[in-house]
Image (tube, rainbow, N blue to C red):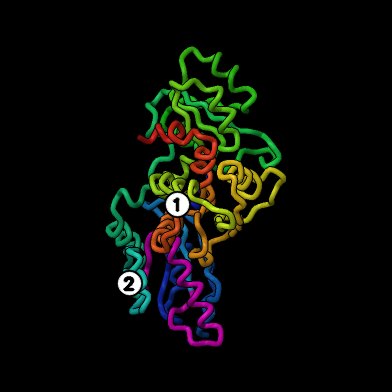
Amino acid sequence: MKALRSQRLHIGIFGKTNAGKSALLNRIAGQDVSIVSEIAGTTTDVVEKSMEFAPLGPVTFLDTAGFDDTSALGKQRIGKTLKVLDRLDVAIVIGQCEITKELEVRNIPYLCVPRDISIDDLRQKLVELLPEDFIHSPRLVGDLVAPGSTVVLVTPIDASAPKGRLILPQVQTIRDLLDNDCVVLTVKPERLAAALENLKTPPALVVTDSQAFKQVDEIVPKAVALTSFSILFGRLKGDLQEFIAGTKAIGALQDGDRILILESCTHQVTCDDIGRVKIPKLLAQKTGKNLKIEHFAGHDLPDITPYKLIIHCGACMTNRREVLSRIAKAKEAGVPITNYGVVISYCLGILPRATTPFI
């Protein structure tokens, strides 16, 4: 299965204008990914190239504009370069560049290399720079159950489901369980009760789409562990304990408070969209307050200081570094942050049960 960009190690390439950043990316990729020119400021937008880079595995390289760009658009280009830092796991800096100060502030490991470094030398230096547990991301679900266990996945097929396929969190969960030698049973909510009755022994875990949480909670025996795809991704991509703590702010919300629904990607909004329809409705029912729900999608982050709570999506389309960066910014601003699955289970009164598998 092709690795998703959100699962890849993100490696930024930085330096001054004409330092050889684009040329290095082209040599790494073995093709003309970025335009190379003697004209300063050739690279404007960040150029991304996903590939296999042994022994690191799947990675995404990001070629950035020169950090000393003084052209008419230089300030905007440097601004885009700085925004990339929130997604980076590691950086390659060609020559001497002020970007190293920004990398150190954000605790991003980096290499300073000459423009003519060989690809084999670069590969070895990256391996030496990154510890083993940094290269390999945390497990999604396979570490929660023993090999050979049966895990039931509940996947509603409704208006928000993509035609002819499963959503990414469901696919990734299936793969992770198969990699852990588990037996995976995937059913729609209306078939769950019959599926459980047909099993000789109870499943080790049931994972449901958050939108079916209430229905599934009523069907699955209390002795069986239950959680959601979104909560699993909250642990994989962010800080689950921070997301759980963020729900405490819900009880203190007042009329007129602003809530930010933070999405990692743009998508077509449906009539039962989880972030724009279902979560606002659940919050209104839980709090009884007239809240101002606002939405923001993409890699950028708006001014978060006016908000009383941030609710992050499942983050299936972004990487762990970006989510952790957003959590850090929320803590710095004193704004509680949680995520879709955690806030839904809280509003339904089943958060303790939904997070028991992680205790």
Binning the other alpha carbons within 10 Å of mark 1 as few (below 14), some (14 to 19) or many (20 upward) gives some
Task: Kindly state the secondary structure of the residue where label 2 is placed.
Answer: strand
Q: In the image, which disc is placed on residue 113? A: 2
Task: Kindly state the secondary structure of the residue where label 1 is placed.
Answer: strand
- Amino acid type indicated by mark 1: Pro
Binning the other alpha carbons within 10 Å of mark 2 as few (below 14), some (14 to 19) or many (20 upward) gives some
Q: CA distance from mark 1 to mark 2?
A: 22 Å
- Residue 331 in the image: state x and y as whole percent: 40, 59
Residue at left offset 36%, top offset 47%: 136
- Res 31 seen here: no
- Residue 263 in the image: state x and y as whole percent: 56, 54
Residue assigned mark 1: 58
- Amino acid type indicated by mark 2: Val
- Residue 29 in the image: state x and y as whole percent: 48, 62
Residue at left offset 50%, top offset 84%: 40
Residue range in magenta is 65-93
- Res 306 seen here: yes
Q: Is residue 194 above or below residue 329?
A: above
Residue at left offset 49%, top offset 75%: 79
Q: Quadrant of residue 179?
A: top left
Left or right of residue 298, residue 106 in this image = left
Residue at left offset 51%, top offset 50%: 315
Left or right of residue 293, residue 350 in this image = left
- Residue 82 in the image: state x and y as whole percent: 45, 71
Is residue 197 in the magenta section?
no
